[in-house]
Amino acid sequence: MKSKAVVASGPGQVAYREVESPAPGPQDVVVRVHRSWISNGTEGSYVRGERIGGDTPWRPGDPLPFPHIPYQKAGTVAQVGEKVTKFEVGDLVFASVCRVEGMFFPYAGHISPGVCHESQVWKLPAGADPEAFSGLVLTQVGYNVGTRPDIRPGDAVVVMGDGMVGHWSAQTLQHRGARVLLLGRHDDRLARFDLNEGDARVNTQNVDAVEAVTQWAPGGIQAIAHSAGSIESLTRLLPLLKRFGQIVSAGYLGTDAMIDIQSLRDRELSLHAVAGWSSERMAATLDLVAGGVLRTRHLITHRFPAEQAAEAFQLILEKRPGVLGVVLEWDGR
């Protein structure tokens, strides 16, 4: 079956072109895509050739993971296999990865129509805006970060990183009753974080992070949610954690991420290294987006027709100012 896809063919090289999808099987759902949301961090590092798996850095001697088709989308069901019972033609759905032929990985994200196993598909509420759900795997990463630490209402939590995962981590923590300080390096991104009473946002280009956190929470913080930033910037904040404090890290740190476990023992700090997705977390994230708890569309800064995917990725690879959420428009093709 012929499909159109966004293909990374080499470091920094992205093109919209025709690819071959396998014939749908009895447990497959064929999805025609409306919107797909680029994951700036994960997809950007894949396209740069920095990793060969979800959290596996590329090392000398490893093959470069090209060609491949990254990530996620929302669309309409066009066909269902004979053993599929949860979906019907016409359903609005989110789909993570679909099957594809001739690629480094046998699965694909930005592809339409996509042949997806039913386990990779989630039904959206009737009348839902597909764009709001088109980055659901990425939104789920923020949900995973925000639900992992053991916190109580009123606890002070610092979120490192003003990218999309940082925002969704902060939103999840707010929903759980935490006071949240969002640290970032971009005023335009930080301004998209709506503050509850006791929350704050700080641009670390202008203010020292340790000083800002100390002033905001002089009694110490319960958790650090690390979505971006170096291991050095994370380590500087560790002395501000209370006893039994927690570190939750989802930021990609490459091959040089070293943390001294022994140094965590004095205050019995714990480290959660979160990754990936689960069906349960995906369902919970979908419900929170549907209920307006996790807000997504306000983080979109750029929209491109799928045919202009190369231009969309260039914005991300060059880390141009003002770029946050980048969505590709397919309109059910």
Image: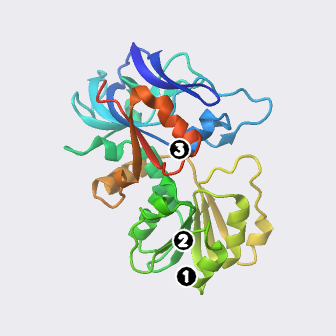
Q: Identify the residue at image location x=49%, y=46%.
A: 277
Query: At numbered mark 2, what does the secondary structure look like: helix, strand or loop?
Result: strand
| Quadrant of the rendering where the N terminus is positioned | top left
Corner quadrant of residue 266: bottom right
Q: Earlier in the sequence, mark 2 or mark 3?
A: 3
Q: Identify the residue at image location x=55%, y=46%.
A: 320
Query: At numbered mark 1, what does the secondary structure look like: helix, strand or loop?
Result: helix
Judged left or right of residue 60, residue 230 is left
> Mark 2 or 1, which is nearer the eye?
2
Give the labeled residue for mark 1.
216
Q: Earlier in the sequence, mark 3 or mark 1?
A: 3
Give the labeled residue for mark 3.
40
Q: How far apart, in angstroms, are the residues tagged by discs 2 and 1?
A: 10 Å
Crowd around label 3: few <14 · some 14–19 · many ≥20 (10 Å): many
Q: Are the two marked residues, 2 and 3, in contact with CB atoms closer than 8 angstroms?
A: no
Q: How far apart, in angstroms, are the residues tagged by discs 3 and 1?
A: 30 Å
Q: Are the two marked residues, 2 and 1, in contact with CB atoms closer than 8 angstroms?
A: yes
Report x, y in % for residue 230: 69, 58
Give the labeled residue for mark 2.
202
Looking at numbered disc 1 in the image, what kind of residue is underneath it? Trp
Report x, y in % for residue 208: 65, 73
Q: Identify the residue at image location x=69%, y=64%.
A: 233
Whether residue 318 is visible to the viewer of this picture, yes or no, is yes
Report x, y in % for residue 283: 37, 49
